[in-house]
Image (cartoon, rainbow, N blue to C red):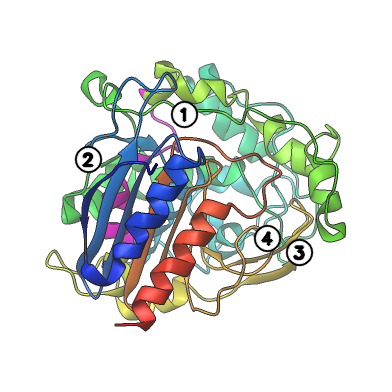
Amino acid sequence: MTGRVHGSVHTGFAAVRDVLSEHLSAGLDLGFSFCAYHRGEVVADLWGGHVDVDRRLDWLPTTLLPLTSITKTVLTTTLWRLAELGDVDIEAPVSSYWREFGANGKADITVATVMSHRAGIPAFPDPITLADELEWWPVVRKIQNLTPLWKPGEAHGYHAIVLGFLTSELIRRVTGAPASAAVRTHVIDPLGIDLHMSLSSDDTRRLAEVLPPSDDQVPEVVPAEQREYVAGFVDQDSLLYRATFGSTAMTFKDMNNPAYHSTERPAAYGTAHAVAKMFAALVSDIPEGRLLSPRSVRMAALERSSGMDEVFRLPTRWAGGFMLPGGPLWPDFGRPAFGHIGSTGALAFADPEYEFSFAFLPNKMKSVYEVPDRRAQALIRTCYAALEGM
């Protein structure tokens, strides 16, 4: 028995449909959307499974999903576009646009340092609440009051929750309007994509439910190189815990709370087609045109951090707001890709040499202990087998 997958796929990428079907049949996926572009054209636009945990409603081509940390790439792309327009200098201090940010030893932290997770401010001292997000200024004050945990620029560690809020406020300071307005002006409208920074009541009805991990037990066998990472999720004093669960009051269950989705916050929603098209517009000539110049894309994808991540306690690589493959979370697959993983197991990236983009958005969350997500890895292997055969 195989799971039914809908949509279109180029003949050379037919195996991608088979992999997605196998994942549905095996129960690895509840529902998903997947899209890939090659040289400016869609080569796979697929979806399947269910939008609800009770498995009563089918996934549709218009179904939306929270992008989780892939949102960072939406904000990053917007920031690089503002840099092209001369509105912001990526190498300038954040405090030159947001004076109060410079308090407590942060005056010299540059935009690039923040974007490459080298600022040393990866955790809030207490969780950001929905009330904080609705008012916004409490979040801003908390960022301003942060003190670096290491000398900025001398180490890197994933700013899981802080970075989205920090980038959003920086964009607001630069443009004078909420970050969502800049995202719409510089990303959504030019491409005509189904991507949103908050949802109307009508759009909320298109949103898939997210199925949280059913098993949060620490694995009995953990590879030696992942022991600190695994231990960090159960040690509330660890920097990993403080930078993730300890920095937000939002839980996995809250990913199905409509109050969060209608709030102006650093959280994007979209289809895999929308995300893949955004990445395609970074590395290829699509009919709507490129979002950034090739030079800006090279700068955005330039490695700025590599080695042991102070938060994850695993090796990671980071560019100017994008994650780079390398390390257990997103294994190196021998390609000059840049993109981001998401907590659901989502993955989106672009490969400039192949002019290829990839977006996988599942609504069944992987366990935080599953490193990397096996579904995304199988899709990567299948896509590159197709590319190499063309």
Q: Residues within 10 Å of mark 3 (few under 14, many from 20)?
A: some
Distance, label 1 to label 3, CA atoms, is 34 Å
Q: Position of residue 195 (x, y in %)?
A: 28, 42
Can you say whether 98 is above or below 86 in the image? above
Q: Kindly state the secondary structure of the residue where label 3 is placed.
A: loop
Residue in the picture at 47% in, 29% down: 210
Q: Which residue is mark 4?
A: 118
Say which amino acid is labelled 4. Arg
In the picture of the structure, the residue carrying the numbered disc 2 is 61
- Three-letter amino acid code at the position of disc 1: Val
| Range covered by the magenta-colored residues | 262-279
Nearer the observer: mark 1 or 4; the answer is 1
Residue 294: percent from the left, percent from the top? 33, 79
Mark toward the start of the polypeptide (1 vs 4): 4
Say what secondary structure mark 2 lies in: loop
Depth check: 18 or 92 in front?
A: 18
The kind of residue tagged 3 is Ala
Q: Are marks 3 and 4 in contact (CB under 8 Å)?
A: yes
Is label 1 or label 3 in front?
1
- Which structural element holds mark 4? loop
Gap in Å between the C-alphas at discs 2 and 3? Answer: 42 Å
Mark 1 or mark 3, which has the lower sequence index?
3
Q: Residue 210 shows which numbered tag? A: 1
Binning the other alpha carbons within 10 Å of mark 2 as few (below 14), some (14 to 19) or many (20 upward) gives some
Q: Left or right of 301: which side holds 309? A: right
